[in-house]
Image: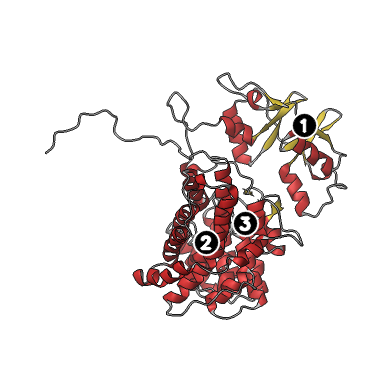
Amino acid sequence: MEHASRTRPGRTVADLMTSPAVTAAASESLTAAASRMASERVGSVVVLDDGALAGILTERDLLAAGAAGADPAAATVGEWMTPGPDVVGPDEEVIDAWRRFAEHGYRHVPVVAGDEVKGVVSLRDLVRVAQLRPVDGLYTDVPRGLEGVVAAETSVGSVRGMEGFFHYRQYDATELARTRSFEDVCQLLFDGELPEAGRPSVADELAELSSLPAGLEALLPGIVAASPGAPLLDQLRSAVSLLGAVEGMRPTRDLTHVELRRDALRIVAAMPLLAAALHRLAGGLAPVPSDPALGMAANYLAMLTGSRPSPEAAAALERYLVLTIDHGLNASTFTARVVASTGADLAAAVVAAIGALSGPLHGGAPSRALDTLDAIGTPERAEAHITSLVASGERIMGFGHRVYKTVDPRSELMKETAREIGAPLSGLAEQVEQTVLSVLAEMKPDRKLYTNVEFFAGVVMDGCGIPRQMFTPTFALSRTVGWCAHVLEQAADNRIIRPASRYVGPPPPQPVPPRP
């Protein structure tokens, strides 16, 4: 299985495609097709019927079958393939193929000339030759905010924005949120597999780390006293920096995987302890000791509120925590990988990620979404309020997403969870949601805007007894698992992330004027 030559200029799909394509019959089992994909190290098989193209089966189809509970030994390729797939010609220019992949969210497309299947081209093939600055010094157009630009390869997880689906490694993330604990999913991201009965687990390791270093605990009142009234996320950022210093965390470049993983578990275990303690100290209350017998979610609520939570509240928060562990190469995750790529210590990467998360366009939306509900007050006032906001060009927090172009699956599960726990704001939120979607559809018909996770996440956290100023810190303690998983991955195959910029200032060189 080889790629065609990549040496000539003016590249076409024929230069990049995998040829011949790995094929399967529609009657074959998913197990057989998946085994062939694994052995050939490809992400798809082309399905042929008497030599003609009938469909394509990709990794995402295998994930969908698994999420639906299909038996891979009994289910057939024909049941789960994409029939009549879009195709490209071998002579198509790479830039044209790239646009088609970006517009439709494709990852694998058969290459066909006439009626003959010549090969398969993948998104990875296109990424390998994509250049933001060719060697001649001329710059290609790059989307603002680097939207759609692939900056890393990862096996941690992915977001399928066109499908309304995201996954952690090989599992549907929403199914994990329904069925597995926060600690289980942490193990999946750190070690690549879910825990098995009778074997040591990440839950056991985190329980052993359920107290702060004495030196750090003594410093927390000073952080609060030095920054009275500061956002707790700012104080948490300082505390994590001190944690790295107190624990003597060394540069990732100098650590083995085992040592770096140990640092990651230390930070993950410390985050809820730090967040809860800082919150209580800021309110003039003593921190509540950790109870390692409780799971992460229940323990965090107990330390935060001072009372043991109901099983329903703990389960609801755990769903939220699992849903927000990771979500592609978002701003904070990318920041963590950039810092880690320099070889800096793990605490430095997490501190930088917290800084990115502090922005209202990233981690601050849940509390702002509830501020909107407060301003509306009753369902009857919703239409006038939302229409006014949209007309004035203001963003409606909790709606729209850079990646999802359909329903955000996290939002749907949070809405369901809010109903289940009888969250006080659940009814109002659902009524306002429908009003917002109706107003947006009327006033912005050219944009596909749906409810995102932040809208109902705030409703759920409020229903669990978490104060609004703790929404983003709670998000941070969840997302820390994703940040650390990405740092572990970055460190395992590191190259410093150093993109180019396009200079748009006055033309150089100009004479330097004399000193006035």
Q: Residues within 10 Å of mark 3 (few under 14, many from 20)?
A: many
In the foreground, 77 or 436: 77
Taking depth in this image into account, of 217 and 425 the one nearest to the observer is 217
Residue kind at label 1, given as amino acid type: Val
Labels 3, 1: front one: 1
The residue pinned by badge 2 equals 476
How many angstroms separate mark 2 from mark 1 (CA)?
43 Å
Q: Compared to 484, does 422 lie above or below? A: below
Dividing the picture into quadrants, the one containing residue 482 is bottom right
Quarter of the rendering containing residue 103: top right
Can you see residue 166?
A: no
Q: Nearer the viewer, mark 2 or mark 1?
A: 2
The three-letter code of the residue at mark 3 reads Asp
Residue tagged 1: 22
- Above or below, 231 against 169 in this view is below
Secondary-structure class at tag 2 = helix
Instruction: Give the image location of residue 269, x and y in percent.
Output: 56, 64
Look at mark 3 in the image and give the residue it sits on: 408
Amino acid type at circle 2 is: Ala
What residue occupies the far left of the structure in this picture?
Answer: 516
426 left or right, relative to 351 = right
Instruction: Please tell me which of labels 3 and 2 falls first in the chain.
Output: 3
Which quadrant is the C terminus positioned in? top left
Disc 3 + disc 1, Cβ < 8 Å: no
